[in-house]
């Protein structure tokens, strides 16, 4: 019991944020850039390599190493462990906040969760609508409407968005294919040319496989497009044009559905603008596809064949 009491009374070790704030006045100008970046993005070391963090902060990887050591860490690896500990991977409450979102608590009433969730999605969509460059998307729609082939790249959740867009494009006469696996995606990207468009979807813009596929498509001559929430991401940097979506901070991490809804919102806009480019072809093809599946939709109040339809009443067992 005495040992437990001593543990409870012992001060908690300084976290990364506290160490940074304590050292602020002693940091060089370059290290101050790192400190400012980490105070704004405390979980960045968990997502980025030392090279990527250095690039985002505008310093060299060696400066990042010196920064870590100035805070008392042996290097970047042990620094990342400290960040993970701060976020609370070993504490249930903090783990919830890191993985589910800071705006939600385990004790929240269902109506509170509903309101917070609605707020997240509303902010995501409205902010995306405010910042999207409609002229840029309209120009992209014209390019896709006239292209020989549209490649769409996405991994994981973004792969679902890619497949959704490819299905819509196909229905309005665009030769499109979605690639969610890097080997076949690279193969297709290598076959693109200047008459093709390649669109890559990634919320962070840092998914390595997606970057590789878009890079290959660009080297093959295709017009390249990145759809991300970060205009400074590596994916945005290699694309001919970047379209920004908004992902609110603090919600449903790490797989934020409101981010996907923002992506889908922009893809919906792109789809509608493409459909406008050749209205007659669009309506003809949509009507044909609707007719093709009409036999698979049940009429209200009418049983399907094989489930009692047309069976004489006398044949129904008691």
Image (cartoon, rainbow, N blue to C red):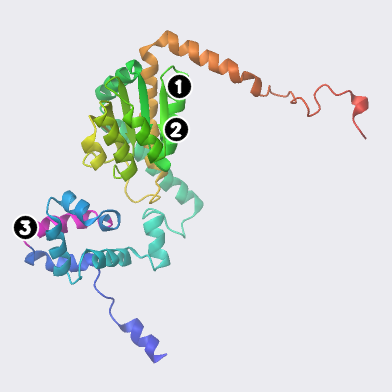
Q: What stretch is highlighted in magenta?
A: 28-43
* Foreground of the two, 5 or 77: 77
Position of 166 relative to 230 (above/below): above
Front label number (1 vs 3): 1
Where does residue 235 sit, x and y in percent of width and height?
26, 39
Residue 305 within the segment the image draws in magenta: no
Q: Is mark 2 on a helix, strand or loop?
A: helix
Q: Name the residue under label 2.
A: 163
- Mark 2 or 3: the one toward you: 2
Secondary structure under tag 1 reads helix
Q: Which residue is drawn at the image coordinates 41% and 24% (left, top)? A: 176
The residue closer to the viewer here, 205 or 150, is 150
Residue under numbered circle 1: 170
Residue 303 occupies which quadrant of the picture? top right
Residue position for label 3? 29
Q: In this image, 299 relative to 77: left or right?
A: right
Per the model, the C-alpha gap separating discs 2 and 3 is 46 Å
- Considering only order in the chain, which callout, 1 or 2, is on the residue closer to the N terminus? 2
């Amino acid at each position: 019991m005495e040992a437990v009491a001593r543990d409870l009374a012992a001060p908690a070790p300084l976290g990364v944020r506290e160490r940074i704030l304590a050292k602020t006045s002693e940091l060089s100008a370059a290290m101050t850039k790192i400190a400012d970046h980490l105070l704004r993005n405390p979980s960045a070391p968990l997502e980025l390599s030392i090279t990527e963090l250095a690039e985002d902060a505008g310093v060299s990887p060696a400066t990042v190493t010196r920064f870590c050591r100035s805070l008392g860490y042996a290097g970047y690896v042990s620094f990342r462990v400290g960040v993970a500990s701060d976020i609370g991977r070993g504490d249930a409450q903090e783990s919830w906040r890191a993985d589910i979102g800071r705006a939600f608590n385990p004790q929240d009433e269902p109506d509170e969760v509903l309101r917070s969730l609605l707020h997240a999605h509303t902010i995501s969509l409205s902010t995306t609508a405010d910042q999207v460059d409609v002229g840029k998307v309209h120009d992209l729609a014209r390019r896709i409407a006239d292209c020989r082939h549209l490649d769409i790249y996405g991994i994981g959740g973004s792969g679902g968005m890619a497949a959704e867009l490819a299905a819509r494009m196909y229905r309005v006469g665009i030769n499109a294919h979605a690639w969610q696996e890097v080997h076949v995606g690279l193969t297709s990207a290598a076959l693109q040319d200047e008459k093709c468009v390649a669109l890559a979807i990634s919320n962070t813009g840092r998914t390595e496989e997606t970057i590789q596929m878009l890079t290959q498509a660009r080297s093959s001559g295709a017009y390249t497009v990145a759809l991300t929430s970060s205009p400074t991401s590596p994916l945005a940097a290699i694309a001919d044009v970047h379209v920004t979506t908004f992902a609110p901070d603090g919600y449903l991490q790490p797989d934020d559905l409101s981010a996907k809804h923002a992506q889908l919102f922009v893809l919906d806009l792109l789809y509608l603008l493409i459909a406008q480019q050749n209205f007659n072809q669009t309506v003809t093809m949509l009507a044909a596809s609707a007719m093709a599946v009409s036999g698979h939709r049940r009429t209200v109040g009418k049983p399907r064949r094989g489930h009692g339809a047309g069976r004489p009443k006398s044949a129904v067992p008691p």
